[in-house]
Amino acid sequence: MSKRFQHLNKYRNAVGKVANKEAWYADLTLGSSPSDHCNLIQASRNWIAVKWTGNGGSMGLLPIDQPGKGCSSKAHVFHAHGAAVSDWSFSDFDDNLLATGAEDGLVKVWKISQEDETPVCLTSLTTPSRRVDLVRFHPTADQIVTTLGNDGKKVCIWDIEKSSCAFEVGTTTTDPFHSFSWKGDGSLFGTSSKGAVDVWDPRAQDKAVMSGSGHEGIKGSRVVWLGDSNAIFTVGMNKLRNRQYALWDVRSMSSPLKMTMFDSSTGIVIPLYDEDTETMYMMSRGDTTIRSLQLSDVQTTPTIAENMACGTNTSIYGAALLPKQSLNVMHAEVARVLAVTENAVLPISFEIPRKQYLDFHAELFPDTKGNVPGLSGSQWISGKNAQVAKVSLDPSNQAVNKTAESIKPSSPRETTPQQVLRNIDEPSVSKPSSQSPTKQNSSNTVDKIDKSVNNNNNNKKNSTDSTSDVAIPKASTSQQEEPVKPKAVPKYGSNHASAYKYISGKAYHPSTHFEDLRGLSVDKSGEVDLIKTNGKLIAVPIAGPGGRVGIISVNKPGRLPTHVPCVLCGSEVTNFQFNPFNDHVLATVSEDNKIRVWTIPEGGLEEDLGEPTAVIGTNAMDKIALLEYHPNAENILMTVSSDISKPTIRIWDLVEQKEKIVLTGMHPDIIFAAAWSPDGSRIATVARDKKIRVLDARTGKVLAEGPAHDNARPSRLVWLGASRIASVGFGRGSMREVLLFNTDDLTRPVKKNNIDVSPSVMGVHYDPDCRVLYVAGKGDRTIHTFELEDDDTLKALAKIESGTLQQGFAFFPKSSCNVRETEIGKFYRLTPNSIELVGVRIPRARPEFFQDDIFVETLDFGHPAQDSASWFSGENKGLKRISLKPDDMTPLSLAPPPPQQAKAKEKFEMGKKAVTEDQRRQELMDRMFSSAKEVVATEEKPVDPNDQEVADDEWDD
């Protein structure tokens, strides 16, 4: 098979289709539920259970095989409770067993007769809550039902045979439980609440064995355990009421595997999970669309992909999945959703297109869980676990399946606890303080989290390694306090060559600009940046009554409307700031000494917004000039005010909407600028008394103090890492300058760079990844850039020139840069009547490779490092870092040498080899001559005296 088609999920092409009206359960008198967790419909293989109107406690049972307009006349309507029914559920092991909960706090279990007789109440259970919001049967054990009350304080597990509560699990916080869901093997269950997702072992301990930070919205969230796997799925809302879904690995719940926001509707999402196809169907009350998410490899490495959505053309108020054994498998129907409308139940079939429907497509229908419980309720309560036997959906095997269901096993297939196969991080596990003698040892809980993967895989293939861990993508844990330094750049020329020597700024195409900006308010103080952006929205002050801040969506460039939609503060705005961790939250301060927090809708404003989310203030606060969000912790805001000649720094908790820390008495004069340190534990200030100070953010203790600029005009400052601060202001004679300070010694600046002589106050921005400082003044055409070298030198780089005067600039987050074009920065440049998009680029010889020497891991501003409570308690945590490398790019450090370099290296090697050959020949000749000389010296001997030369006359004739 071609690699292009490998690893494609076979259910990705499922098509949803609403049944013809003849197949609807129409003309019903349906009621609603007071519980937000109720699906308003439940189905077994025999019945559809809905709430009936007329009497608050009435239920209606529709035969599953009798749809049509006249189905209401065939409905079995009975009076279940004296109060309104709030939730109900069918047993997985008995199609005629129904549990109901109501506003009277009772749970009743009913046995339904196939005849027209009224269902018989088998037992009645009194819960500790005023109303029962959620009722579910146990997934593997018979005669066990679980309930959750409207107060959300306790999840109760009931033994129906004994009509008693076997176990109770209570919340350990003030936030109530929203929902619960059992694991497929029935050993654990998960709960969701505001800002939390927990995993519990009710038979082992009273505390959660795993916890994570969930959805933060007030409205109820829902949790669904994905079968026997170690993954759970949650849906809920964030603080801005944007709906989200998340996927979690219960073995490591410090962060979700994936959390995605999909819309901003207020309806509560109903998740329906099909364990066999690993598909999640989502709909909400009032929606007309059923979303489908395709999960893959849930047992090993879970992933999520969106399938085709199904429209219904009518509002849906509730939904349930039809049991698998009731599907039309011969038409490749993999799921059927029963959707509740105003007066009908709509069957919506999801089918897989196939060339022929004559044969049973076994690849689409794995064996599904049968109707025989794995064990009895008493066995489960005693600590045993067992799986439910699976049956085939092949119609030719239906007779065998029915025979198997009719035979109850004498001894269920039990699983015994095993030793821990993998270690789970200790901080994620809540250790029990004590253990009840009726509960299992809590050490087996960790086994249960991992055991399902082993058991499930062994049923499929014995050779599967049960100890394989789920690969969870994690961001780098590099802390923000010490920015990652760029990798060493090869030095072929000067020893001090800079990677940013040829930095340049170029405006994007005019089609990306915002033209015809009218009414820009330029009368703000020098400490205020006139433009702010977070990559999605732009904020600029607009002149006019009511204190206006214009909100512009970055996705709508071009000519701006005559009237830019604004937030109306009621008084002249003095400063404003976007929340770094939430793109749709803006904070403003105004002359009425109030802090207003605004929630901007997705896509920006269509009209003026006059109602803020929160208004905060105190009578002692006067003339607020500055505000700044905490760099690492969410919902913490710093403000600076004059307070009648008593300059004060206040730190606010936006969750509690009150000031938590007040720092006063350190500054005898007006504070020009204040900035958080990268780790958020210190605050640097510069004031009109010409002093720069570093304060402890929690206590106000002055950690260091020293002289700043000689001029009393306004100045700005920014942290350059953990121990360096740059202050931009004025020296003598209105000389604009940049001073570099070491926080360990503020008695004098480490470095001073003069810029030019001009009266305009400068704005400043620092890129910690590239260690580049940008400085620009209002009314200038130039942006000055500096590189921080060796922590003690600010080296001037090339200037970024423009043809028009600028009123300010605002940088995008680093993750918005186009790394393929070696763009190290992107910002909006504000002019009196337009907003221009400018990119900062570095020319590189090999741009086809990812330049990992300049694009180091950057801070992940999408996820705060901590919440406000932890910071106020004394903790300091840095943001995690993420890589900017696209998946299809090769890092420059791993790239092959360029052709020129390879050719030069080849020539060098050839020359080196030639030299080596000459040396070898010379050495060989030398050895030969040396050997010859030794031979000659050995053969020459002295002449014997007896062997004298014979005279001529001695020769015979």
Image (spheres, grey):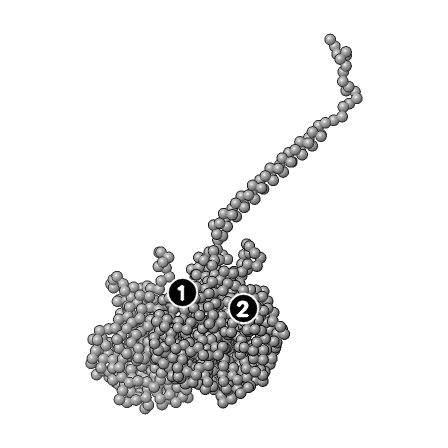
Residue at 55% over, 84% down: 647
Residue 659 position, x and y percent, is 51, 85
Task: Say which element carries label 1.
Answer: loop
Residue 651, above or below 359: below
Identify residue for label 2: 755
Residue 645 position, x and y percent, is 55, 86
Disc on res. 338: none
Q: Nearer the viewer, mark 2 or mark 1?
A: 2
Q: Is residue 499 visible?
A: yes
Q: Residue furthest bottom?
A: 82
Work out whether residue 750 or residue 870 is closer to the camera in this orientation and state it.
750
Please state which amino acid type lies under the numbered disc 1: Tyr
Please state which amino acid type lies under the numbered disc 2: Ile
Identify residue for label 1: 508
Q: Residue furthest right?
A: 945
Residue at 46% over, 68% down: 781
Work out whether residue 50 or residue 30 is closer to the camera in this orientation and state it.
30
Work out whether residue 692 or residue 724 is closer to the camera in this orientation and state it.
692
Residue 761 position, x and y percent, is 50, 74
Task: Say which element carries label 2.
Answer: strand
Q: Is residue 438 visible?
A: no
Residue 487 position, x and y percent, is 53, 61
Q: Is residue 361 left or right of residue 728?
A: left
Mark positioned earlier in the residue sequence (2 or 1): 1
Image quadrant in which you'd find residue 451: bottom left
